[in-house]
Image (cartoon, rainbow, N blue to C red):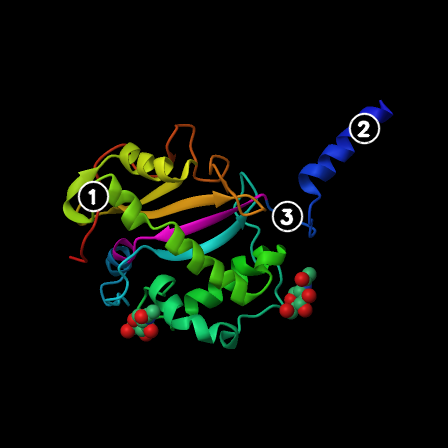
């Protein structure tokens, strides 16, 4: 009996013990990219007076964030409240962050998304030596956004931005899975005006060694094979903000 308890303790330490920071432990990192056109359409739909920062150089998907996540939960978030965002740390990569990790919402400051992502998620990612500074966190996003280029990945499966054409969830999922060998999670936003489900975000998951793993255990993953909240078919991948 004592031995079994001991085994359970060892197992629990192995499973949960690594870099345990109280209740801020996590299993995977979700790397979320957004399709800026869908983000903008949705932003304008919620506030007709709003505007978007869609620069001509935003020709790819852009980073939303790098989110350490405990499977089956959301978060942890805000792991170190005394670690504030400092723009000076990332000044020399800002042109790239504007292009690949830019704030789409015209009303918000240039640094608002970065500040939010750093405080909410970056301070949790900072448990890993490879992500333990603002510079490393944001550079990792820039590295991954070029490595996981969904315009190219989807294009190889003839899935192109188009305001009329629709695609199936399975086709989008298969394009990403064929390329990277893991289950992504794919999200859509329902547009009440056009009555269409618009492709909005694609998530890839990494373990704590930053190797790709299936996203199956994250929240928003359902029992079906294809993860995320998109409907089975009729998904648009908008080409423009109409
Ligand atoms: C929290 O952030 C502060 C400021 O950067 C730092 O000095 C401290 O070591 C951090 N705490 C942990 C547990 O990393
Ligand atoms: C992208 O465009 C924005 C807005 O014009 C500019 O501030 C930024 O420096 C550009 N970034 C790159 C890498 O060209």
What residue is shown at x 47% (from left), y 34% (from top)?
Answer: 216
Q: Nearer the viewer, residue 118 or 78?
A: 118
Tell me where residue 170 appears, x and y as whole percent.
30, 32
Q: Is residue 217 magenta?
A: no
What residue is shown at x 28% (from left), y 62% (from top)?
Answer: 58
Looking at the image, is mark 2 or mark 3 earlier in the sequence?
Answer: 2
**Residue 5 image label:** 2
Q: Gap in Å between the C-alphas at discs 2 and 3?
A: 22 Å
What residue is shown at x 58% (from left), y 60% (from top)?
Answer: 123
State whether residue 88 is above or below residue 123: below
State whether residue 105 is above or below residue 32: below
Q: Residues within 10 Å of mark 1 (few under 14, many from 20)?
A: some
Give the residue pinned by disc 3. Answer: 25
Q: In which quarter of the image is residue 241?
A: bottom left
In the picture as drawn, the residue positioned furthest to the top comes out as 1
Tell me where residue 151 appears, x and y as whole percent.
28, 50
Of labels 2 and 1, the one closer to you: 2
Helix, strand or loop for disc 1: strand
- Ligand 1 lies in quarter: bottom right
Q: Gap in Å between the C-alphas at discs 3 and 1?
A: 38 Å
Q: What stretch is highlighted in magenta?
A: 27-39
Helix, strand or loop for disc 3: loop
Tell me where residue 184 appears, x and y as whole percent.
40, 39
Give the residue pinned by disc 1. Answer: 196
């Amino acid at each position: 009996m004592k031995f079994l308890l001991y085994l359970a303790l060892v197992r629990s330490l192995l499973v949960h013990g690594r870099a345990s920071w109280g209740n801020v432990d996590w299993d995977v990192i979700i790397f979320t990219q957004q399709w800026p056109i869908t983000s903008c359409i949705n932003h304008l739909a919620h506030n007709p007076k709003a505007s978007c920062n869609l620069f001509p150089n935003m020709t790819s998907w852009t980073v939303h964030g790098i989110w350490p996540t405990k499977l089956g939960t959301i978060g942890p978030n805000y792991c170190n409240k005394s670690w504030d965002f400092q723009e000076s740390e990332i000044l020399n990569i800002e042109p790239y962050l504007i292009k690949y990790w830019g704030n789409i919402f015209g009303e918000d400051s240039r640094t608002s998304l970065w500040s939010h992502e750093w405080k909410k998620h970056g301070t949790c990612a900072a448990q890993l030596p490879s992500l333990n500074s603002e510079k490393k966190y944001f550079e990792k996003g820039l590295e991954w956004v070029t490595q996981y280029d969904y315009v190219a990945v989807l294009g190889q499966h003839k899935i192109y931005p188009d305001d009329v054409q629709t695609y199936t969830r399975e086709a989008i999922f298969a394009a990403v899975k064929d390329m990277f060998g893991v289950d992504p999670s794919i999200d859509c936003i329902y547009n009440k005006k056009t009555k269409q489900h618009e492709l909005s975000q694609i998530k890839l998951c990494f373990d704590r060694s930053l190797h790709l793993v299936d996203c199956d255990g994250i929240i928003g993953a359902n029992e079906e094979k294809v993860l995320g909240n998109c409907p089975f078919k009729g998904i648009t991948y908008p080409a423009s903000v109409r």
